[in-house]
Amino acid sequence: MEGKKVLVADDEPFAQNLLKMLYGALKVECMVVANGKEALEAYQKSPDFAHILMDIHMPVMDGYDSTKQIRAHEKAKGLPRCKILGLSGDGDPKTKAACITAGMDDLLVKPLKKDQLSQYL
Protein backbone atom coordinates (compact mmCIF):
# COMPACT_ATOMS: atom_id res chain seq x y z
CA MET A 1 0.00 0.00 0.00
CA GLU A 2 3.04 2.24 0.16
CA GLY A 3 3.00 5.08 -2.32
CA LYS A 4 -0.75 5.48 -2.25
CA LYS A 5 -2.35 8.76 -1.29
CA VAL A 6 -5.82 9.44 0.12
CA LEU A 7 -7.83 12.59 0.75
CA VAL A 8 -9.70 12.91 4.05
CA ALA A 9 -12.37 15.58 4.50
CA ASP A 10 -13.48 15.89 8.12
CA ASP A 11 -14.05 18.98 10.25
CA GLU A 12 -13.33 17.35 13.62
CA PRO A 13 -9.66 17.62 14.71
CA PHE A 14 -9.88 14.40 16.75
CA ALA A 15 -11.17 12.46 13.75
CA GLN A 16 -8.52 14.05 11.50
CA ASN A 17 -5.72 12.94 13.84
CA LEU A 18 -7.15 9.45 14.26
CA LEU A 19 -7.47 8.99 10.50
CA LYS A 20 -3.91 10.23 9.93
CA MET A 21 -2.75 7.65 12.47
CA LEU A 22 -4.75 4.82 10.87
CA TYR A 23 -3.55 5.63 7.36
CA GLY A 24 0.01 6.07 8.67
CA ALA A 25 -0.15 2.54 10.07
CA LEU A 26 -1.06 1.40 6.55
CA LYS A 27 1.87 3.41 5.12
CA VAL A 28 -0.51 5.55 3.07
CA GLU A 29 -0.03 9.28 2.59
CA CYS A 30 -3.01 11.17 3.97
CA MET A 31 -3.99 14.71 2.97
CA VAL A 32 -6.54 16.20 5.40
CA VAL A 33 -8.95 19.06 4.73
CA ALA A 34 -11.65 20.51 6.99
CA ASN A 35 -14.66 20.85 4.68
CA GLY A 36 -16.17 19.82 1.37
CA LYS A 37 -15.05 22.97 -0.46
CA GLU A 38 -11.43 22.28 0.46
CA ALA A 39 -11.87 18.65 -0.64
CA LEU A 40 -13.18 19.75 -4.03
CA GLU A 41 -10.30 22.20 -4.47
CA ALA A 42 -7.70 19.60 -3.43
CA TYR A 43 -9.14 17.05 -5.87
CA GLN A 44 -9.25 19.57 -8.71
CA LYS A 45 -5.55 20.35 -8.16
CA SER A 46 -4.45 16.72 -7.82
CA PRO A 47 -6.96 13.99 -8.78
CA ASP A 48 -4.60 11.09 -8.09
CA PHE A 49 -6.01 9.84 -4.80
CA ALA A 50 -6.61 6.13 -4.11
CA HIS A 51 -9.87 7.26 -2.53
CA ILE A 52 -11.55 10.15 -0.77
CA LEU A 53 -12.95 9.70 2.72
CA MET A 54 -15.71 12.31 2.96
CA ASP A 55 -17.51 13.22 6.17
CA ILE A 56 -21.10 13.97 5.18
CA HIS A 57 -21.73 16.75 7.73
CA MET A 58 -19.21 19.61 7.50
CA PRO A 59 -19.35 23.40 7.50
CA VAL A 60 -18.92 25.52 4.33
CA MET A 61 -19.82 22.61 2.01
CA ASP A 62 -21.10 19.22 3.15
CA GLY A 63 -19.93 15.88 1.82
CA TYR A 64 -22.97 15.39 -0.41
CA ASP A 65 -22.47 18.65 -2.34
CA SER A 66 -18.72 18.17 -2.53
CA THR A 67 -19.19 14.69 -3.99
CA LYS A 68 -21.66 15.94 -6.60
CA GLN A 69 -19.21 18.63 -7.66
CA ILE A 70 -16.28 16.19 -7.78
CA ARG A 71 -18.34 13.88 -10.01
CA ALA A 72 -19.23 16.81 -12.30
CA HIS A 73 -15.54 17.78 -12.47
CA GLU A 74 -14.53 14.20 -13.35
CA LYS A 75 -17.12 14.11 -16.12
CA ALA A 76 -16.16 17.54 -17.51
CA LYS A 77 -12.43 16.69 -17.54
CA GLY A 78 -12.81 13.06 -18.65
CA LEU A 79 -11.14 11.80 -15.47
CA PRO A 80 -11.55 8.27 -14.13
CA ARG A 81 -13.98 7.95 -11.25
CA CYS A 82 -12.26 8.24 -7.86
CA LYS A 83 -13.72 6.10 -5.11
CA ILE A 84 -15.50 8.36 -2.58
CA LEU A 85 -16.42 6.88 0.78
CA GLY A 86 -18.95 8.71 2.92
CA LEU A 87 -18.16 8.96 6.61
CA SER A 88 -20.74 9.36 9.35
CA GLY A 89 -21.63 8.36 12.87
CA ASP A 90 -25.05 7.40 11.49
CA GLY A 91 -25.40 3.94 9.96
CA ASP A 92 -29.05 4.35 8.99
CA PRO A 93 -29.91 2.84 5.57
CA LYS A 94 -31.42 6.19 4.51
CA THR A 95 -28.06 7.87 5.13
CA LYS A 96 -26.29 5.28 2.98
CA ALA A 97 -28.90 5.73 0.24
CA ALA A 98 -28.34 9.51 0.33
CA CYS A 99 -24.60 8.94 -0.03
CA ILE A 100 -25.05 6.66 -3.03
CA THR A 101 -27.49 9.12 -4.63
CA ALA A 102 -24.93 11.93 -4.22
CA GLY A 103 -22.33 9.81 -6.05
CA MET A 104 -20.43 8.19 -3.19
CA ASP A 105 -19.40 4.55 -3.51
CA ASP A 106 -20.12 3.49 0.06
CA LEU A 107 -20.73 4.73 3.61
CA LEU A 108 -18.36 3.96 6.46
CA VAL A 109 -19.66 4.41 10.00
CA LYS A 110 -17.54 5.87 12.81
CA PRO A 111 -15.63 4.64 14.68
CA LEU A 112 -13.45 3.24 11.92
CA LYS A 113 -10.91 0.46 12.07
CA LYS A 114 -7.74 0.11 10.03
CA ASP A 115 -9.08 -3.00 8.27
CA GLN A 116 -12.09 -1.05 6.97
CA LEU A 117 -9.82 1.52 5.34
CA SER A 118 -7.36 -1.00 3.91
CA GLN A 119 -10.04 -2.83 1.92
CA TYR A 120 -10.54 0.30 -0.23
CA LEU A 121 -6.86 0.79 -1.09
Image (cartoon, rainbow, N blue to C red):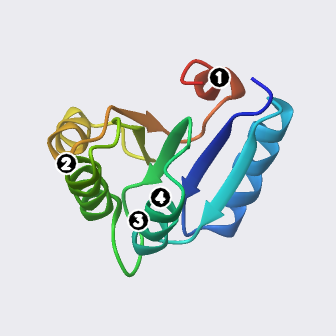
For mark 3, give the secondary structure: helix
* Mark 3 vs mark 2: in front: 3
Dot 3 surroundings within 10 Å: few (below 14), some, or many (20 or more)?
Answer: many
Task: Using residue 98 as the reference point, say whether residue 106 is left or right of it.
Answer: right
* Image marks 1 and 3: residues in contact by CB distance under 8 Å: no
* Image marks 2 and 1: residues in contact by CB distance under 8 Å: no
Q: Identify the residue shown where x is 43% and y is 62%.
A: 44
Dot 2 surroundings within 10 Å: few (below 14), some, or many (20 or more)?
Answer: some
* Image marks 1 and 4: residues in contact by CB distance under 8 Å: no
The CA span between labels 2 and 1 is 23 Å
* Image marks 3 and 4: residues in contact by CB distance under 8 Å: yes
| 66, 45: nearer the viewer | 45
Quarter holding the C terminus is top right
* Mark 2 vs mark 4: in front: 4
Res. 57 image quadrant: bottom left
User: According to the image, label 2 marks what residue?
Assistant: 102
